[in-house]
Image: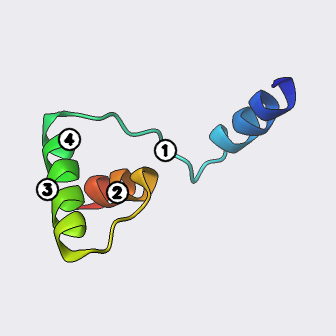
Amino acid sequence: MVKNQQQLNVFLVKPTVKILDVNKESAEIFGEVKDQLKKSGTPLPINDIWIAAHTI
């Protein structure tokens, strides 16, 4: 676990990495995207849906 934490810390200090907060808007978009993907039969992993929600 210590090794994983170290790798995470190295990743998080990169200048290209930004931690985004989940807010009401991004959570609503997440739900819409997840629902649309499920209905179309093309579900994605949860992390990918969060990324999509934040970019939208």
Q: Is residue 23 above or below residue 49?
A: above
Instruction: Name the mark on residue 32.
Output: 3
Instruction: Name the mark on residue 4.
Output: none
Give yes or no for contact between labels 2 and 4 (Cβ–Cβ under 8 Å): no
Question: Which of the two discs, 1 and 3, labels the residue nearer the N terminus?
Answer: 1
**Circle 1 sits in a helix, a strand or a loop, which is it?**
loop
Q: What residue type is labelled 2?
A: Ile
Q: Which amino acid does label 1 sit on?
A: Lys
Question: Which of the two discs, 3 and 2, labels the residue nearer the N terminus?
Answer: 3
Given this view, does label 4 or label 3 mark the residue nearer the observer?
3
Give yes or no for contact between labels 1 and 3 (Cβ–Cβ under 8 Å): no
Q: Nearer the viewer, residue 26 or 33?
A: 33
**Circle 2 sits in a helix, a strand or a loop, which is it?**
helix
Identify the image quadrant of residue 41.
Answer: bottom left
Task: Identify the residue shown where x is 14% and y is 34%.
Answer: 24
Task: Identify the residue shown where x is 81% and y is 31%.
Answer: 6
Q: Which amino acid does label 3 sit on?
A: Glu
Identify the image quadrant of residue 22.
Answer: top left
Instruction: Name the mark on residue 18.
Output: 1
Q: In which quarter of the image is the C terminus?
A: bottom left
Q: Which colour scheme is used?
A: rainbow
